[in-house]
Amino acid sequence: MVALIALFEREGYARVEPPVLQPADVFIDLSGEDIRRRMFVTQDASGAELCLRPEYTIPVCLQHLSRRGARPSGYSYGGPVFRMRPNESGEFLQAGIESIGRSDIAGADAEILGLALEGLSLIGGPAPIVRLGDMGLLHALIDALGVAPAAKRRVIRAIVSGQGLASLSEAEGPAAQEHAGLLAAIEGQAPQAAKAFVEDILSIAGIATVGGRSAGEIAERFLARAANRTVLSNEARQVLERYLTISGDPDQAADAVRLLAKDAGLDLGPAIGLFEERTGFMAARELDVSAFSFAATFARNLDYYTGFIFEVQDPRRSDGKPIVGGGRYDRLLEHLGAESPIPAVGCSFWLDRIVGRP
């Protein structure tokens, strides 16, 4: 870890060490179900929930906002993190870097990946396997298809969870169509607000019970129905399914996405342009782009990633778990209290997997 931190500091990433105890609600709101289920949670004297630091990105971002605001900064870190992992220790060491506030998106992405690979070369080992993805391309495609925001969240969650589009519900038939207006009205609302809305509708209609069910129980059934509505047209589903088959090196992937956009009549020019610009910066850093593998289905299991994502694997490991992972999270700092979005990208090293590989 010492060699890694020294490399990062030489490159302008100042060493920081956020507190081990962190506010639990921040991770529960922003990190997704994967980390939420695996945190070690406790309470302070006032009853507020705290957690042992499950990762570094959110704590580093909170520290950045308290000290630097929107000013660009680079940070490095190294220390213990805590989360339950099947067949692995719940306390383990991570090191990494976060680049916050840089406007040269493609260049910053390439730098983070380049430093990740340079850091691994310091530690030693065989040529790593590099997997690339791009949540920005996926978001741009879904937006170009005109998918509604609530439906978009479901589509992305299905892809990130690895379940794919097959997990989304099919058409529900005439019964669903009869209540389509009400279902559309509550789709995407917060659960309590949606339930109150349905109860109000029933109250206005003078309905207290139906078939022995209370207004609250009826509202719950409507919420369940809204959650399972069909979210994609056949055309949108076909385009997304074709997109999810795209794989290859970055140049091959860009060509395939450009052809898909042309065939579907969609404008993905800015997203593809950023993708290709990033590849150019990688090549300029003398990274072997042709050896990298892009897959449209690849998504990291944290909700805050918004753009470029990557994982690095050690081919000697039998379990396929990454030894480095990272990506871009341009909306995270706004969720943490920034007045507007602040671009950011970073990566973490699983040091226990690098030192103690199976």
Image (spheres, helix red, strand yellow):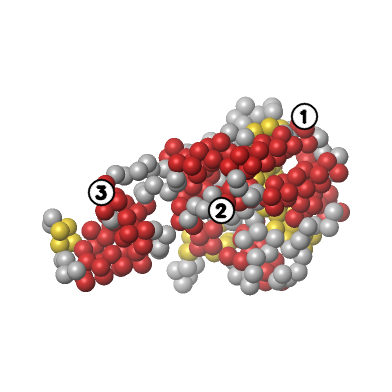
Residue at point 70%, 71% (across, down): 69
The disc at residue 175 is 3
Residue on which disc 2 sits: 143
Neighbour class for label 2 at 10 Å: few (<14), some, many (≥20)? Answer: some
* Residue 228 position in % (x across, y down): 36, 48
Quarter of the figure with residue 313: top right
Q: Mark 2 or 3 closer to N-term?
A: 2
Q: Residues within 10 Å of mark 1 (few under 14, many from 20)?
A: few
Secondary structure of the residue carrying numbered label 3: helix
Cα gap from disc 2 to disc 3, whole angstroms: 29 Å
Would you say residue 302 is visible in this rendering? no
- In what quadrant of the picture does the C terminus appear? top right
Where does residue 181 sit, x and y in percent of width and height?
Answer: 32, 59
| Viewer-nearest residue: 290 or 170 | 170
Among the two numbered marks 2 and 1 on one chain, the one whose residue lies closer to the N terminus: 1
Residue that lies at the very extreme toward the left in this rendered image? 212
- Residue 339: image x %, image y %? 63, 72
For disc 1, the marked residue is 126
Residue found 37% across the figure and 52% down from its top: 227
Please say if the residues under marks 1 and 3 sit with CB atoms less than 8 Å apart: no
Residue at (37, 41) in percent of width and height: 170
User: Which of 71/15 is in front?
Assistant: 71
Q: Is residue 190 left or right of residue 237?
A: left
Decide which of 234, 83 is in the foreground and name it: 234
